[in-house]
Amino acid sequence: MRAKDWIRTVLFWSLMVSLSVVWARMNTFGRGTRLGEVVDFLPVVLVFALFVVVYATDPGLRRKRRNDTLPLGVNIAGTRSGIGYDLHRLAEGRKLMIGGIEVPFDKGSVGHSDGDVLSHALCDALLGAASLGDIGTHFPDTDPKWKGVSSLLFLEHTRKLLDDRRLDISHVDAIVICERPKLGPHFPAMRAALAKSLGISIEQINLKAKTNEGTGEIGRGEAIAAHAIATLEG
């Protein structure tokens, strides 16, 4: 038995003994009076309140209860992780949207939506961790309703899908790969925008930037890419 389980057990039986003593004293003090009739029910109320507190503060019990509401055969309790990747060509005349904010640059991502490579990679990572397919399944580039929209909407929709499956986002980590511009100064604003869309704290999001050392289409400034990993708790 783990230490915290021993502590819970000792506290529980200590409370039970204490309540029994209080019950006996109250019954002796107030036996045959209206006060005695009232206090007879007090220990029962206290015991019930104890179980309510234990249930409300024990994440294990809540998690088991939430899994009981899922369809038969679906068991997604525990820690789950998913990976995501995305790449977009860069072209003049487009805004460079990364992590939900516009980064000043002379080129932007080409895409059906706003071409936000970071948000797309995060979507894929979250959907993968939840076994919900990929971004193309939920937001196909053949659907005109997604044309030109902010990719933060993709993250908000993904978060709702996770909520439906009783999954909480524990942490996300991502790397954006581009030769230019420098992204580090923009990370605080990106983290804030992403955290708001995902309904999590800024501390649950980590972002990094790398170059491609001048090689390939990324190194030539023709494309931008992102890798992401997401950890969920169910």
Image (cartoon, rainbow, N blue to C red):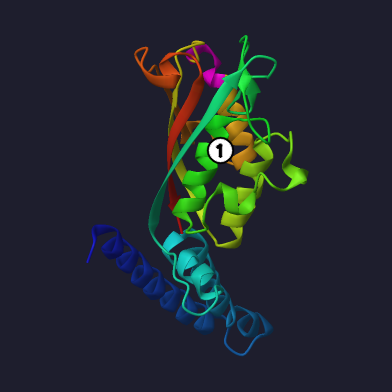
Tag 1: amino acid:
His
Corner quadrant of residue 2: bottom left
Could you tell me which residue is drawn at 63 percent across and 85 percent down?
A: 37
Looking at the rendered image, the quarter that the N terminus falls into is: bottom left
Image coordinates for residue 193, horizontal then vertical, percent? 62, 29
* 199 over 127 or under it: above or below: above
Could you tell me which residue is drawn at 52 percent across and 20 percent down?
A: 187
Name the residue furthest left. Answer: 1
Image coordinates for residue 3, horizontal then vertical, percent? 24, 58
Could you tell me which residue is drawn at 42 percent across and 48 percent down?
A: 82
Corner quadrant of residue 200: top right
* 90 over 116 or under it: above or below: above
Q: Is residue 24 a member of the stretch shown in magenta?
A: no
Depth order, front residue of 39/73 = 73
Corner quadrant of residue 146: top right
Q: Is residue 187 a member of the stretch shown in magenta?
A: yes
* 93 over 85 or under it: above or below: above
Depth order, front residue of 213/54 = 213
Q: Magenta segment range?
A: 184-188
Give the residue number, with chain letter if any, for mark 1: 120
Left/right of residue 29 with respect to residue 160 in the rendered view: left
Q: What kind of secondary structure does the magenta stretch mostly adopt?
A: helix
